[in-house]
Amino acid sequence: MDVLSDVLALMRTGRPRAARVAWHAPWGQRFPTVPGSAGFQVVLEGTGRLIPPDGEPIALAAGDVLFSPRGHGYAMADTVSTPPAEPACDPLEDELGLFAADSFGGEGAATVLLCGGYRFDVSRAHPILADLPDLVHLPGALGRDAELSAAIGLLSTEVQRPGGGADTIVTSLLDMLLLYILRACFAAEPGRCQVGGWAAALADPGISAVLDAVHRDPARPWTVQEMGERAGLSRSAFARRFTALVGQPPLTYLTWWRLATAARLLRESDAVLGEIAARVGYGSEYAFANAFKREHGMSPGRYRREAAARLAPPPGRNRRPAVFGQARDVVKT
């Protein structure tokens, strides 16, 4: 797995959600802060205004992408003079459906938004997301990036007119879209996403090659010398550069990644502890259990039990359609 793919695999819980919403002027909506989540809005048609918690409103046009990597709230409206309505529900509520299409507002011109939401476990957050600002605005992304544009078009069509296999298709497209947005953020011109060292780390051929190798093979008995050789740098030069860009020394990051991978295996597989220990580079179950407890504050066995309890669906809960905003009948779910 590569670094950006690991952001999803490491952090996401449950299924993402999507909606295609036509807002008819006059309209205004406040999107709440949802801790432990990430979300995006894509302007498919029309115009609007982004009203951030701080700062001046920002004009939005077709093709613009908004990305909230840590679930911070904001508001949108047709004009700055339209007061945003308060949200009536959490778009990531567990009992909501996977996707929906609907329309809200008045009788005027429509602004069509494609929305997506992801539930993340902040206890296992990848540091790459910490480098992003609370709210990212990618103007005209729909027309500038062919891959991002294609993913947006496919997801919009599937949400509006779902066919056979729509649940799997929508889930996969949401994952694709999030990764394309992250790519666009880290490839954006300086100042657009205000990213920190991780953007430079992913763009640096040597450091990126080491990160990719460590993520693909965490069990390898890596040394700083070997990492430096792979990066084409001396041991000391590599250690300095890696620490400056990633924010951690090479072996500290390696240990963090090994134990983060182990936590994912405990949540998602039935592998015994000895097998997991070997897969992440520990020679004994005892050494692995001690390292895991230092990192996560509990034994691997307890972590697995608590993770299973969190993921178990509450009894007697019925699914109902997903609506991003006021409650209303959906066109299709």
Image: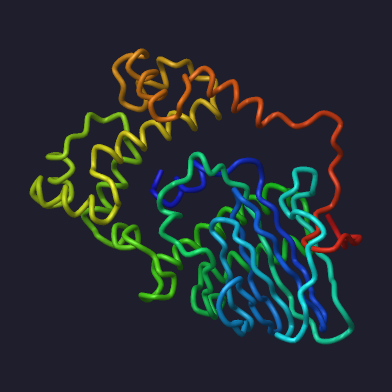
> Foreground residue, 103 or 76?
76
> Foreground residue, 250 or 4?
250
Instruction: Give the percent coordinates (x, y) of residue 37.
Output: 60, 51
Quadrant of the rendered image containing residue 27: bottom right
Q: Residue at x 11, y 52 (%)?
A: 237
Name the residue furthest front: 54
Q: Residue at x 53, y 24 (%)?
A: 303
Above or below, comparing residue 202 to residue 269 in the picture: below
Name the residue furthest right: 329
Q: Residue at x 61, y 85 (%)?
A: 59
Instruction: Give the percent coordinates (x, y) of residue 12.
Output: 57, 44
Q: Quadrant of the C terminus?
A: bottom right
Q: Residue at x 50, y 62 (%)?
A: 180
How many tags in the picture? 0
Q: Quadrant of the N terminus?
A: top left
* Horizontal side of residue 126 vs 282, given as left or right: right
* Horizontal side of residue 151 vs 200, given as left or right: right
Instruction: Give the percent coordinates (x, y) of residue 186.
Output: 40, 65
Above or below, comparing residue 315 to residue 49 in the picture: above
> Foreground residue, 160 or 228?
228
Q: How is the protein colored in the picture?
A: rainbow
Instruction: Give the percent coordinates (x, y) of residue 132.
Output: 45, 62
Above or below, comparing residue 61 to residue 226 in the picture: below
Above or below, comparing residue 37 to residue 288 in the picture: below
